Amino acid sequence: MKHDVIIVGGGVSGTALLYTLCKYTNIKSIGIIEKYPDFGLVNSAANMNSQTLHFGDIETNYTFEKAKKVKRSADMVMRYLEAEKKRNGNEKLFIKVPKMVLAVGKGQVDTLRDRFKQFGQLFPNLRMIGKEDIGTIEPRVLEGRAPGQELLALVTEDGYTVDFGKLSHSFVNNAKKENPDLSVYLSTKVVKIMRKGELLNLTTDKGEFEASAVVVAAGSHSLKIAKSLGYGKNYSILSMSGSFYTGPRVLNGKVYTMQISKLPFAAIHGDPEVHDENITRFGPTAKPIFFLERYNYSTFFEYWKTFGFSIKPILSILKISSDKVIFNYLLRNVIYDIPSIGKRSFLKEIRKIVPKINLNEIKFARKIGGTRPQIINNSTRKLELGEAKIVGEKIIFNITPSPGASTCLGNAFDDTIKLMDFFNHKFTFRKEVFEKDLILLSEFITDDISVKSKTLISFQC
Ligand SMILES: Cc1cc2nc3c(=O)[nH]c(=O)nc-3n(C[C@H](O)[C@H](O)[C@H](O)COP(=O)(O)OP(=O)(O)OC[C@H]3O[C@@H](n4cnc5c(N)ncnc54)[C@H](O)[C@@H]3O)c2cc1C
């Protein structure tokens, strides 16, 4: 089979690109190849991630620049979700709950207060609240705390909790409506990509495919494929699995703790499950594993191939873990996954959010939580924060740790621009329509959202 564009990977990243190409470009011959029988079954599945649409408002390890970038992409997803809801009614793609970041003790309170001065301008719906208001929104956060303990929170009503697996399906269904000719190849695994003259040849377990341009959105597998073509040699992957503990409904919305600025992982938080608000999830933990996909033990060798068999990544790991903060963090997180002692030590973390929760109220959530392909840069010997995009000759590779689901449409936008360049503008991207629908004001958005849009535009200018 031959196509103009082939997308490898049917998670939320690949399907967001599929939707963008079908709705906003005139490329007709498009194929998407996914190795599993359905879309969104790996990291994008609702049980694999924290279900948070990250804007950068309550993630205290984001710089202002990073928050601006993530917000732009998250706004696109928010507008898509709101438009879908308006069009189709509640399809349970998302729920909206209050969302806060909680500072405990003088040091954290001072840091958060300072942060609000700058970030409050980027996020006009974000409010700074004290103890009393915290208790009104989240009574269990206050219950049992020492009366003298200083507390401060930044809170917003925009706590979008999203089923990113379902969102992947929504993207595909809408893409099909726009381009009924698009080709979907499920249960088809790409085993090799090679150049064949002007084209790229994809060998799969179901036969050969050819494409003029390829976007690989296969999570951590993207780096493995990139390396096989000679790209991304300088990167390795630290596969950071994340587990959760669950409890009864003790929170009304999302409550995040303050982030350790050196770490590229989300701080521990408690939030309601997207499909059952009576369940509160606490996590995720962050434990290194030697698999590209969690619970898929056949990806062990693929992991080492991606890591690289040389001294460089080993030196990077040694340098990264020689940092006391990172080493202690990793050690603590390995313990959290050990039955019995893990539960007891994680309870201490949960009690930073809900002080009076009991040991018998929580349980380890089995088979919940995927793994984040955290990128190691072997030149700087540092962990990178967020996603990586490697652009080759008519091929793009996306590697997507958190907040990769929140940035899926932003990534799709960037990839579409690059694809237009690959084709020397033989095709057109109706960028202004994309922007009208998903960035600028649209007929679907509510009043409070439109305030945000205006802010966004002013920041872009
Ligand atoms: C514990 C945890 C918590 C997280 N929390 C959040 C959060 O709250 N908010 C957020 O925005 N992000 C979060 N993330 C990150 C988010 O889940 C991912 O960034 C996002 O799902 C990545 O989507 P993707 O489509 O790039 O990858 P995936 O969803 O992993 O999809 C990749 C697809 O490629 C397919 N594939 C792989 N290899 C091949 C091949 N050879 N041939 C064909 N198909 C192939 C796979 O089967 C898969 O379907 C979290 C991640 C974890 C692990």
Image: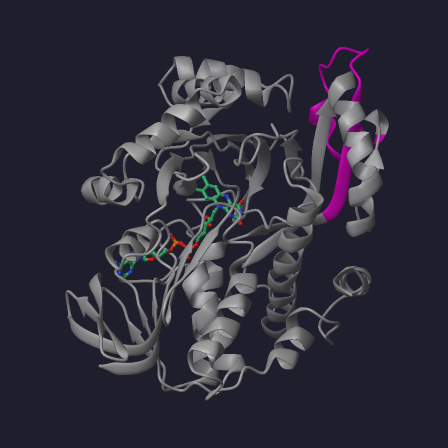
x, y percentage for residue 22?
47, 80
With respect to residue 27, does 273 lie above or below? above
User: In what quadrant of the picture does the N terminus appear?
Assistant: bottom left
The residue lying toward the viewer, choosing from 389 and 172, is 389
- Dividing the picture into quadrants, the one containing residue 173 is bottom left
Q: Is residue 345 above or below residue 114?
A: above
Magenta region: 133-157
The reply, left or right, for residue 278 in relation to residue 218 is: right
Closer to us: 204 or 256: 204
Q: Residue 275 in the image: x percent, y percent?
A: 52, 49
Note whether 252 is above or below 340 in the view shown.
below
Position of the C terminus, as image quadrant, is bottom right
Residue 32 locus on image (x, y percent): 33, 71
Q: Is residue 378 magenta?
A: no
Q: Is residue 190 left or right of 21 when viewed as pictured?
A: left
Q: Quadrant of residue 368?
A: top left
Magenta run includes residue 135:
yes
Q: How many marks?
A: 0
Q: Which quarter of the picture shows residue 211?
A: bottom left
Residue 196, compared with residue 12, is above or below; it is: below
Q: Is residue 228 left or right of residue 29?
A: left
